[in-house]
Image (cartoon, rainbow, N blue to C red):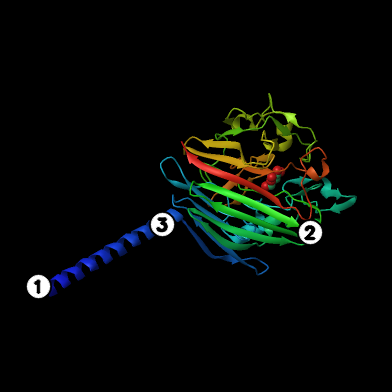
Amino acid sequence: MIASSRILRKMVTAATVVTALVLVSNLISIRAQAQSGSVVKQAYGTTADGVAVDEYTLTNAAGAEVKIITYGGIVTSLKVPDRHGQLANVVLGFKTLADYETKNPYFGGIIGRYGNRIANGKFSIDGTEYTLAANNAPNSLHGGTKGFDKRVWTGKEVQDGGNVGVELTYLSPDGEEGYPGNLSVKVVYTLTAANELRIDYSATTDKTTVVNLTNHSYFNLAGNGAGAIYDHLLWVDADKYTPVDATLIPTGELASVEGTPFDFRAAKTIGSGVRSSSEQMVLGRGYDHNFVLNRPADNSLALAARLYEANSGRTMEVWTMEPGVQIYTANFLDGTLVGSSGGMYRQGDAICLETQHFPDSPNQADFPSTLLNPGETYQTTTIYKFTTD
Ligand code: BGC
């Protein structure tokens, strides 16, 4: 009798320990899930040509969320907290795939094979001249008529501890849009646990070609549809910029920013210079210029720019390995596009900070080279890091 009640007591204790262990392990796994974030893939739509497009939603443990579609590798939404923890989408976008296909002024897309302009749509490599579409007459802009922002990429989920991401790949065939060489491209978007959107670009080719990849997100730290970004404070680590001609092709000069609206070495509002009578601001219809970053000689990641919006307390830092950043104040938005905010977008409603090699480098021998040879790997990283004050 005494022996059997002792056995019973032992069994009860063992069961309690097991239950407690199960509870603890459940709690640990719930916490791990919360700490690791998630990647959710779902169907987004079908292109006019009948190709299926997926959407990847990356969410980190802090609740920040990025949506990326396989059409163009477009960042359609990027939600980050303000100083009170309230999330807002800080990029412009559209509500439908059809809008992205038919009227997108490059919102959120991966730009390639060559970001920004190539003069008269022509360049030569080793004596062979290549001709591109003059889709921004007389120049070629952002990879031509159907650049990487209009191609359907192959997506694959990536998860590494607290960092969540999507790897996008695309094979740009030899001769596509006039560029030589089969270019195999990989772009990995990662939302880190520290509220960074990290973009790792890489590419290889089988013929010498030119490559200059970037992302064309239109940022508004007060939120998508919140109006103009003229009160945003901008700091850019650049002593020089590349002035342009009337068709927005760099003249080749690296001009000092000293005493010009391009001097953001001490943070100032974008509005303070955007309507300046300086010839360059008139030519650009606002900021639409490449800044020459003061960066270390090696290709390490360096802080290039910082954008701050006082009402929300949001700051965005831009870290890059690239030598330049195209600062574009959405000068061509004219109220005709209705976006994902439900309202129309007007001039100055966002700012793009497109990290890149300089525009028209294939025709400018003194600019850092954008050539990629067979056997080499193009590799570059940019990080948009969000914090609050
Ligand atoms: C260019 C602008 C162009 C815009 C298109 C920018 O990168 O510099 O001139 O209008 O992209 O959205």
Residue 274, quarter of picture? top right
Q: Nearer the viewer, mark 1 or mark 2?
A: 1
Crowd tier of the residue under label 1, counting other residues whose Cα lies within 10 Å: few below 14, some 14–19, many 20 or above: few
User: Percent x, y for residue 56?
Assistant: 54, 60
Q: Nearer the viewer, mark 1 or mark 3?
A: 1
Numbered disc 2: secondary structure: loop
Numbered disc 3: secondary structure: helix
Q: Residue furthest right?
A: 127
Crowd tier of the residue under label 3, counting other residues whose Cα lies within 10 Å: few below 14, some 14–19, many 20 or above: some
Residue 219, quarter of picture? top right
Circle 1 residue: 2
- Is there CB contact under 8 Å for labels 1 and 2? no
| Quarter, ligand 1 | top right
Q: Specify whether 62 is left or right of 273.
A: left
Q: Specify whether 121 is left or right of 186.
A: right
Q: CA distance from mark 3 to mark 2?
A: 43 Å
- Looking at the picture, which amino acid does disc 2 mark? Asp
Q: CA distance from mark 1 to mark 3?
A: 45 Å
- Looking at the picture, which amino acid does disc 3 mark? Ala
Circle 2 residue: 206
Question: Which numbered disc, 1 or 3, marks the residue that appears first in the sequence?
Answer: 1
Q: CA distance from mark 1 to mark 2?
A: 83 Å
Please tell me which residue is depicted at 60% across the width and 36% down the height of the picture: 305
User: Percent x, y for residue 193?
Assistant: 48, 49
Circle 3 residue: 32
Question: Which numbered disc, 1 or 2, marks the residue that appears first in the sequence?
Answer: 1
Give 214 or 366, whichever is nearer the viewer: 366
Q: Residue furthest top?
A: 259
Numbered disc 1: secondary structure: helix
Question: Which numbered disc, 3 or 2, marks the residue that appears first in the sequence?
Answer: 3
- Looking at the picture, which amino acid does disc 1 mark? Ile
Mark 2 Cβ and ligand 1 under 8 Å apart: no
